Image (cartoon, rainbow, N blue to C red):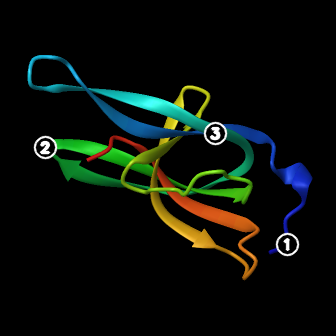
Amino acid sequence: MDIRIGELRHRITFERLSRASDGQGGFEIHWVELQSCWAKIENKGARERVFAEKIEENRIFLITIRNTLDHEIEMSMDRIKFGDRFFQIKGIEYVDERRFWIQLTCAEGVAS
């Protein structure tokens, strides 16, 4: 992978879905901050579809990070926060054999 450290200029935060009992038999959903790191965020395009009788736009991004994480990424439970934007993780690829670089395919938009 040919990437320079200077290209990692976006500060992102990994968040994990957490459920806590509400004391009435149900639960409340919270997002717990796991770890922040530097990343390279590239826009890879957009797509539209009809969902629930309305047009939904999803933008696809490729987010590259160094593997300095102290947790395993769980696609179904984790999301990425960048400023006031949120990205759902759709794919994880370890780019080299040493697992030094991780590329995450993410969607920004309505989660469905």
Pointers 3 and 2 in contact (C-beta within 8 Å)? no
Q: Determine the CA span between mark 3 and mark 1.
A: 25 Å
Image depth: mark 3 or mark 2 in front: 3
Tell me the tag on residue 52: 2
Q: Determine the CA span between mark 2 and mark 1.
A: 42 Å
The residue drawn where x is 81% and y is 42% is: 9
The residue drawn where x is 29% and y is 44% is: 56
Left or right of 96, for residue 79: left
Q: Could you tell me residue 35's position as x and y percent?
A: 64, 39
Task: Name which residue type carries label 3.
Answer: Gln
Which secondary structure lies at badge 2?
loop
Q: Is residue 59 above or below residue 15?
A: below
Q: Is residue 13 above or below residue 39?
A: above
- Name the foreground residue: 66 vs 45: 66
Left or right of 1, for residue 33: left
Q: Determine the CA span between mark 3 and mark 2.
A: 34 Å
Left or right of 10, for residue 15: left
On the image, numbered disc 3 is attached to which residue?
Answer: 35
Q: Quadrant of residue 2?
A: bottom right
Which secondary structure lies at badge 1?
loop
The residue drawn where x is 63% and y is 64% is: 103
Pointers 3 and 1 in contact (C-beta within 8 Å)? no
Left or right of 102, for residue 38: right
Q: Could you tell me residue 105's position as x and y percent?
A: 53, 61
On the image, numbered disc 1 is attached to which residue?
Answer: 2
Task: Name which residue type carries label 1.
Answer: Asp
